[in-house]
Amino acid sequence: MNEIAITYKVLALSFNPPTEELVAALRATGFFGAALPEDTDVESLLSEHTRVFSLTVAGGVAPYQLEYGDPGAFSKTQRMADIAGFHKAFGVELTAPERIDHIGAELEFMHWLVCKEERGTEVGKDEQVQVCRDAATKFMEDHLGRWAPFFAEQLSIAARHPFYQALGAALGDFIEKECKRLGVEPDVITIPAPPSCGAEFGCQLEEEATAEEAGK
């Protein structure tokens, strides 16, 4: 497994709720250095994980793509369907009980694509290599590369524990490098989705109500 695939995997696992086993495994990679010393208090990490991450941006830093950006161009349903389309095209299923727009799930998907591309290179399957590279490029441009930089920045700001501060910085740096490697310049999201758009069609209903009120 190459370094890029390993980095995707380590970052993906880092967003799981901390356990003794997970912390030990992450420490063994040496990826986070001094941010995960031998005497790391797993309970404090779990407390920080619970405090920082939220289902919506209203409660903290939401680790879900659909909680970011202006949903005017594409509805949440459309964006979720597009992500699901990538998974279906490659027969990928999540093993964890998470939404497919979770940061960990999107990193895992990219990990899978990189590994499949590497395998194609090893066995001389040029078509497989190209298909995986094209999918990775498209997924980074349309999904992960659009919201992960802003999410990483917000995580670094909100985090109090050195591990999650380091995680935010590592994610931001890695996504920037991957965008360059894949030759994409995503239209990066820099705002959370408006609270009024939390439910599907929420903005449309609000606009209609406003128009109706104005017409009275």
Image (spheres, rainbow, N blue to C red):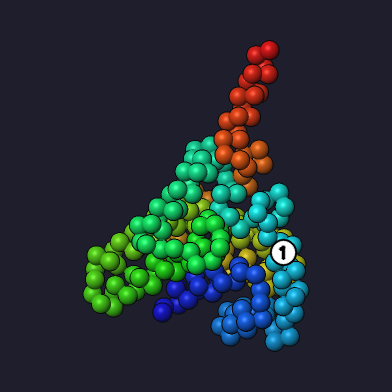
Give the residue drawn at x 24%, y 71%.
125
The quadrant of the image that shows the N terminus is: bottom left
Residue 139: percent from left, percent from top: 42, 56
Q: Nearer the viewer, residue 42 or 157?
A: 42
Tag count: 1
Question: What element does badge 1 sit on?
Answer: helix
**In the displayed structure image, the side of residue 77 where residue 18 appears, left or right:** right
Looking at the picture, which amino acid does disc 1 mark?
Answer: Thr
Extreme-top residue of the structure:
216
Vertical order, 112 against 65 (above or below):
below
Give the residue drawn at x 29%, y 63%.
130
Give the residue drawn at x 40%, y 52%.
85
Is residue 27 something that shows in the picture? no
The quadrant of the image that shows the C terminus is: top right
Q: Nearer the viewer, residue 65 or 18?
A: 18
Where residue 102 sits, quadrant-wise, is: bottom right
Is residue 55 something that shows in the picture? yes
Q: Which residue is mark 1?
A: 50
Give the residue drawn at x 63%, y 47%.
192
Q: Nearer the viewer, residue 178 or 139?
A: 139
Residue 114: percent from left, percent from top: 39, 69
